[in-house]
Image (spheres, rainbow, N blue to C red):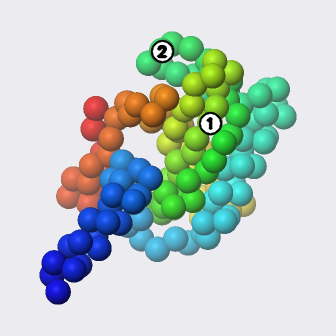
């Protein structure tokens, strides 16, 4: 029986789009996955209306990225504690590259959610960092 569970876990690990690359849920979601995805889309739309596009500064390459949302990874939306939520989304840049961004939001309800941090996790499929759970706290590993 232990081997069956191990094999099922291994299959789930291999099938996942981003296995163990992101923080995962440590508490049950207070908000639904749909509410979190909607909040990210709303944030991006407001940014587009305000600035004429969705722009993120890429610290590593010292450039401003003009991005268009491709996909929010709903399987990666997580409550990571203390009314903080994590999401992963793919964007296409005006330079032709695809970027995977990690987005953090805080708030007690959907109406209160505020984006607190956006990081370029991957550029054209190449990860800049990973995530590791260290004694219950998720930390970036470079």
Q: Is residue 58 above or below residue 24?
A: above
Which quadrant does the C terminus fall into?
A: top left
Is there any visible trace of residue 20 in the rendered image? yes
* Residue that sits furthest to the top in the current view: 62
Residue 76: horizontal and vertical position, in percent?
A: 49, 57
Number of numbered tags placed on the structure image: 2
Q: Mark 2 sits on what residue?
A: 61
Dot 2: element? loop
| In this rendering, position of residue 42 left or right of residue 115 | right
Disc 1 marks which residue? 91
Residue 69's quadrant in the figure?
A: top right
Q: In the image, 103: left or right of 41?
A: left
The residue drawn where x is 72% and y is 41% is 44
Front residue of 73/105: it is 73
Q: Is residue 17 above or below residue 59?
A: below
Farthest left residue in view = 2
Q: Furthest residue to the bottom?
A: 1
Identity of the residue drawn at 67% across and 29% down: 67
Q: Which mark is residue 130?
A: none
Disc 1 versus disc 2: distance between alpha carbons?
A: 17 Å
- Secondary structure state at the residue bearing disc 1: strand
Relative image position of residue 117 (x, y in whole percent): 53, 39
| Residue 83 coordinates in the image, percent (x, y) | 51, 61
Give the residue at x 44% y 18%: 60
Q: Position of residue 118 (x, y in %)?
A: 54, 37
């Amino acid at each position: 029986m232990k081997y069956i569970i191990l094999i099922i876990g291994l299959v789930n690990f291999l099938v996942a789009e981003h296995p163990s690359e992101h923080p995962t849920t440590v508490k049950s979601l207070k908000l639904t996955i749909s509410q979190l995805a909607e909040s990210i889309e709303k944030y991006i739309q407001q940014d587009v209306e305000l600035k004429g596009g969705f722009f993120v500064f890429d610290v590593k390459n010292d450039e401003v990225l003009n991005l268009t949302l491709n996909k929010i990874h709903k399987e990666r939306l997580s409550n990571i504690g203390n009314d903080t939520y994590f999401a992963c989304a793919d964007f296409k840049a005006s330079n032709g590259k695809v970027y995977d961004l990690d987005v953090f939001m805080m708030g007690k309800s959907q109406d209160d959610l505020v984006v607190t941090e956006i990081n370029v996790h991957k550029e054209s499929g190449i990860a800049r960092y990973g995530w590791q759970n260290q004694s219950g706290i998720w930390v970036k590993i470079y």
